[in-house]
Image (cartoon, rainbow, N blue to C red):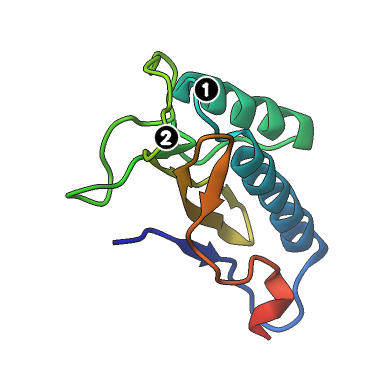
């Protein structure tokens, strides 16, 4: 099982607002993937995401930054405030920073990772760049 998403909607020419929003979500997804490793707390990943939203000048669409994956598509640990069980090797972590922009819609880049001994391996391979879908 995997969980991934690439969403960015537009009609005609992609607006500067959509490109800027996508670039922000792309950055958040990349930095989250780089931060997934053994010993990291899910709440730390959540706080990282909220800090990045603030730096980029946006609000998060959801009160989480991701979740685990197992028998169901969304299961603990969730990347939320107060989730303080450290990640360990073999755990699945789905990172999914998401925003909604007026006049643009929802922008989401979601990837499934597995925690390794020294970081994580990304299990999803669909391109993340908006122009990959033209």
Quadrant where the N terminus sits is bottom left
Residue at image coords 48%, 20%: 41
- Quarter of the image for residue 55 reads top right
Residue at image coords 53%, 65%: 6
Residue at image coords 51%, 35%: 117
User: Residue at label 1?
Assistant: 40
> Pointer 2: residues within 10 angstroms few (<14), some, or many (20+)?
some
State the residue in front, 41 or 18: 41
- Please determine whether, in this image, residue 94 is positioned above or below residue 125: above
- Where in the figure is residue 20, as x and y percent of width and height? 79, 55
Give the number of callouts: 2
State the residue in front, 74 or 2: 2
Taking the view exactly as shown, the residue that stands out farthest to the left is: 71
- Where in the figure is residue 84, as x and y percent of width and height? 40, 14
Quadrant where the C terminus sits is bottom right
- Please determine whether, in this image, residue 72 is positioned above or below residue 2: above
- Which structural element holds mark 2? loop
- Which structural element holds mark 1? loop
Q: CA distance from mark 2 to mark 1?
A: 11 Å
Q: Which numbered mark, 2 or 1, is in the foreground of this view?
A: 2
Q: Determine contact: label 2, label 1, CB under 8 Å.
A: no
User: In the shown orientation, is residue 91 left or right of residue 99?
Assistant: left
- Quarter of the image for residue 104 reads bottom right
Mark 2 or 1 closer to N-term? 1
Residue at image coords 54%, 65%: 7
User: Residue at label 2?
Assistant: 89
> Pointer 1: residues within 10 angstroms few (<14), some, or many (20+)?
some
- Where in the figure is residue 93, as x and y percent of width and height? 42, 41
């Amino acid at each position: 099982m995997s969980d991934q998403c690439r969403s960015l909607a537009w009609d005609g020419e992609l607006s500067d607002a959509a490109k800027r929003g996508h670039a922000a979500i792309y950055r958040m997804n990349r930095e989250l993937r780089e931060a997934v490793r053994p010993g990291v707390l899910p709440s730390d990943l959540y706080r990282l995401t909220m800090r990045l939203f603030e730096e980029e000048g946006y609000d998060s669409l959801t009160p989480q930054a991701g979740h685990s994956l197992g028998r169901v598509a969304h299961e603990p640990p969730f990347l939320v405030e107060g989730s303080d069980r450290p990640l360990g090797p073999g755990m699945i972590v789905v990172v999914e920073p998401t925003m909604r922009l007026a006049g643009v819609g929802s922008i989401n880049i979601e990837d499934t990772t597995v925690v390794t001994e020294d970081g994580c391996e990304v299990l999803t391979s669909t391109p993340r760049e908006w122009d990959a879908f033209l």
